[in-house]
Image (cartoon, coloured by chain):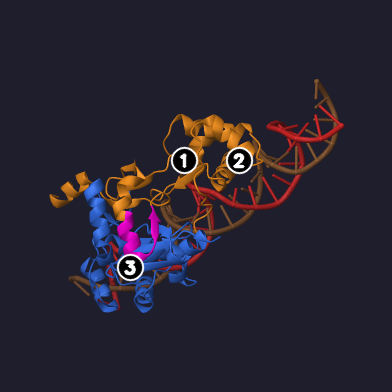
Chain colours: A orange, B blue, C red, D brown
DNA sequence: ACGTAGTTGCGACCCACTTGCAATTGCGAG
DNA sequence: CTCGCAATTGCAAGTGGGTCGCAACTACGT
């Protein structure tokens, strides 16, 4: 049960270069693909497949997210028990979420360099927090936990 | 969408003390609960609800795992896209899994103290890797990745 | 041994995808 | 520009993992 479809992120800073990348991989630029990518570039935060489909056919959207993920344009994260959230892969970010209040944020990978090095030194694994987030108590919830 | 049912682990080193803990919480010791706990104490590794049900009624097993989790006897981890894996909460362990080969291991929380401190210093979150694992490339897969 | 609230087991149901397949369409060749 | 056809879509049906309603059953205090 390995983690599906992990490809190196492909650098496509805007919608146009993403569509070019599609064609460069011998894939077609269809309406559904254009829509999914347009939405992801428009509001740069992780979205569910439902949201990206926006009333259209979800099956196609899932298939497209799969192929976009396979070529490294898109990735997805599981922040909790709900549906997966898809985002652009070139906006490389790690995720943190609070187990108590459910808040989450994307953090620049550099900020976790020290922690990742510590993990690699201790376990031999080079970690990333892009598929599953770091789960913990945020500052606010640590507070209210101490004074219940 | 917060992470469900996270209770402080309850220290019950053996089956008998777990059953006592159940009664202490005003809960009944039913056949299904006895079976689930017996299995978890017998082979101490994370198990799916299916496995724990072993042909019996899975719905009851899920309900019981829920209540056992609520009182801190049990916890569950999501190692990938498959079903959740349940284990005893008192055997407190963090998890690491390899994104390439799917291998996973439980690691003693102390070994990750430095990394967790680094994360808390940088992000303000006090992390645990018991619900979602640390995902990364294991030593073996880093190797074969470098020489494909 | 009894009463009853807690639990079970079954079936139906829900959500998040996935798949089979006929109809459609992007796009390179002519 | 328009043909040809493989890639892609849209729908419907299916699957895996988990939840829920409810009548029957049972653990446990009295």
Whether residue B7 appears in this view of the structure is no
Which quadrant is the N terminus of chain B positioned in? top left
Indicate the position of residue B141 as horizontal and vertical percent values: 48, 63
Across and down, in percent, residue D6 comes to 75, 43
Tell which circle, 1 or 2, labels the residue nearer the N-terminal end.
Answer: 2
Q: Quadrant of the C terminus of chain B?
A: bottom right
Q: What is the quadrant of residue A55 in the picture?
A: top right
Dot in front, 2 or 3:
3
The residue positioned 27% from the left and 65% from the top of the image is B109
Toward which corner of the image does residue A123 lie, by quadrant? Answer: bottom left
Tell me, yes or no, whether the two marked residues, 2 and 3, touch with CB atoms within 8 Å. Answer: no
Q: Secondary structure at mark 2?
A: helix
Q: Which mark is residue A90?
A: 1
Label 1 Cα crowd, 10 Å radius (few <14 / some 14-19 / many 20+): some
User: Badges 1 and 2: C-beta atoms under 8 Å apart?
Assistant: no
Helix, strand or loop at mark 3: strand
Q: Which residue is mark 2?
A: A60
In three-dimensional space, the C-alpha distance between marks 2 and 3, rounded to whole angstroms, equals 40 Å
Q: Residues within 10 Å of mark 2 (few under 14, many from 20)?
A: some
On screen, residue A25 versus residue A11, left or right, reads: right
Residue of label 3? B107
How far apart are the two marked residues, 1 and 2, measured between alpha carbons?
22 Å
Range of residues picked out in magenta: A116-128
Which one is in front, B9 or B62?
A: B9
Evaluate whether label 2 is on the same chain as label 3: no
Nearest to viewer (mark 1 / mark 2): 1
> Is A124 rendered above or below residue A147?
below
């Amino acid at each position: 049960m390995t983690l599906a479809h992990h490809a190196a992120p492909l650098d496509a800073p805007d919608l146009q270069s993403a569509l070019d990348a599609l064609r460069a991989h011998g894939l077609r630029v269809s309406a559904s693909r254009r829509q999914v990518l347009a939405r992801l570039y428009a509001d740069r935060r992780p979205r569910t497949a439902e949201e990206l489909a926006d009333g259209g056919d979800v099956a196609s959207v899932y298939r497209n997210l799969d192929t976009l993920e396979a070529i490294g344009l898109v990735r997805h994260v599981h922040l909790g028990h709900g549906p997966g959230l898809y985002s652009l892969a070139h906006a490389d970010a790690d995720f943190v979420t609070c187990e108590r209040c459910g808040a989450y944020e994307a953090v620049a990978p550099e900020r976790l360099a020290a922690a990742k090095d510590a993990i690699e030194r201790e376990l031999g694994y080079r970690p990333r927090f892009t598929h599953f987030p770091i789960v913990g108590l945020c500052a606010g919830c640590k507070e209210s936990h101490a004074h219940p």
